[in-house]
Image (cartoon, rainbow, N blue to C red):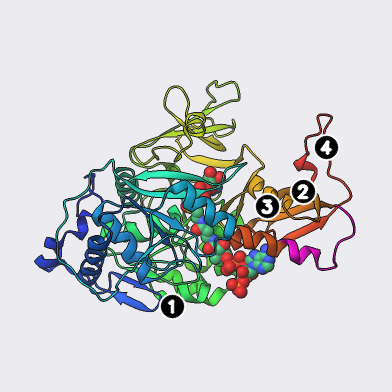
Amino acid sequence: MSFGTPLLLSSLDPLAVAGGADIPNAITIDGATLSRSDLLGAATSVAERVARAERVAVLAEPTVTTVLAIVGCLIAGVTVVPVPPDSGTAELAHILADSGAQAWLGKAPADSALPAIPVRVHARSWHTYPEPGSATTAFVLYTSGTTGLPKGVVLSRGAIAAGLDALADAWAWTANDTLVHGLPLFHVHGLVLGVLGPLRVGSPLVHTGKPTPQAYAAARGTLYFGVPTVWSRIVEDQDAAKQLADARLLVSGSAPLPVPVFERLRELTGHAPVERYGMSETMITLSTRADGERRPGWVGTPVRGVQTRLRDEAGADVAHDGESIGGLQVRGPMLFDGYLNRPEATAESWTDDGWFKTGDVAVIDAAGFHRIVGRESVDLIKSGGYRIGAGEVETVLLGHPDIAEVAVVGLPDPDLGQRVVAFVVLRGAAADSIEQDLIAYVAEQLSVHKRPREIRVVDSLPRNAMGKVQKKRLT
Ligand code: MLC
Ligand code: AMP
């Protein structure tokens, strides 16, 4: 292993495989298991096909093909744009145009104008490629902002390597672990931590498809990743939860873990979950530690290499006294390189002295423990761990002929944390099925997880004297 080096995936070095370090069950996904040497041989064959491209799109279904496409690109130094497999037409068109992806690698959506480079699951190559430099872009990950279309987060190999090594340190994650999760492969959590993490550490991965309580229980791993919705569904299924007692570490992140879920998980499994905090732009910057305190409602201390601070609205320092609230700013080696094609948005997200403004508000106590209090903007919604921009959903709904005005908010939800609710003012009488029609309309344009769960038809939206919608009054 090579912790501390900037060489992403150096533990996939063919010499290690030839030297007897093969792992028979390196990855299990979609019912198939690949050994490390199979994975390496097949991914190198992908690398040979794709090596002349600069940037390719991968329809990130949880399959062997997706894993091979991504690892092949990492070997060849080609940038991957992971695309949510359920992307609607508007979202897909934006991601392809903005990213400049030259081709699909693996499966392509129907009717796509881009060429597709096939991934041959059974092909093998043992060619060796020089390790691309750590400044090479590994991924452009699309993520929603408060307004406008999703922005492409440019993540380098060096940032990913630093981020993964810091987590291996915090969680005492080693080749003796078996990681289990069933998260999507187009975000930091499921893809970077959940696929590249085990490859770098050398621990087998079991991807469960959907992250159901039964699948988590059956997988018999040592290390489990989940968003809070996954954990809250697991504690509802006592039998499944009790089967996680043999695990080493249960890790929650991507959204706040409700304290009652933390407590119930501890009761049923005997494990206090590790909570960690991150963003697409920063990877994981805060975590409780395998060997440290786990405090319900708190996300722990900075991981290796990270510094944090709190600032008030005027930019002044906020005390680390466990009570004073401020905007959380971070810096460290796992941060992104900027938003693709968006120099202004990139500049706005950094302070003049080089700290990244997370947009989250937090408190820090005297021991350096952090609690995330919420977000600065009501327009970024977290539902089931997915980040959804209210503005993006509003823009789509305003394109529907029956809608005169719309405000999209995230209302508290016991299962999803927040659920997407659209308050709409109609232009006139509409069909009885208008609510279902509008939900389906959003799913056609964006990803299905961005659909409102509820549509509420209202006569008018609450506005202030300036005419701005007062979203806090929409409950
Ligand atoms: C959903 N459904 C709807 C609907 N929304 N039907 C009608 N209208 C709507 N608005 C349907 C679904 O299609 C599904 O149908 C069924 O209802 C259940 O949907 P669900 O409640 O959404 O459950 P599920 O599909 O199981 O999804 C829950 C979940 C998912 C937790 C599995 O939200 C998830 O995978 N979240 C992970 C997000 C994530 O990885 N975030 C990380 C970001 S990175 P059917 O027919 O399919 O059953 C990051 C950095 C960090 O944040 O810190 O990690
Ligand atoms: P994303 O870019 O999808 O990774 O979303 C990042 C956002 O998720 C952060 O800015 C936080 O608002 C939220 N988040 C991630 N992890 C946590 C956590 N452990 N607790 C609270 N919020 C979290």
Q: Assess disc 2: are there few (<14), some (14-19) or many (≥20) residues with their C-alpha within 10 Å of its C-alpha.
A: many
Residue in the picture at 47% in, 53% down: 96
Q: Is 132 inside the magenta-drawn segment?
A: no
Q: Quadrant location of the N terminus? A: bottom left
Mark drawn on residue 218: 1
Lower sequence index among marks 1 and 3 = 1
Lower sequence index among marks 1 and 2 = 1
Residue 365 visible in the snapshot: no
Lower sequence index among marks 2 and 3 = 3
Disc 2 secondary structure class: strand
Where 81 falls versus 119 (above or below)? above
Lower sequence index among marks 4 and 3 = 3
Q: How many marks?
A: 4
Which callout, 4 or 1, points to the residue nearer the camera? 4
Q: Is residue 32 left or right of residue 6?
A: right
Which callout, 4 or 2, points to the residue nearer the camera? 2
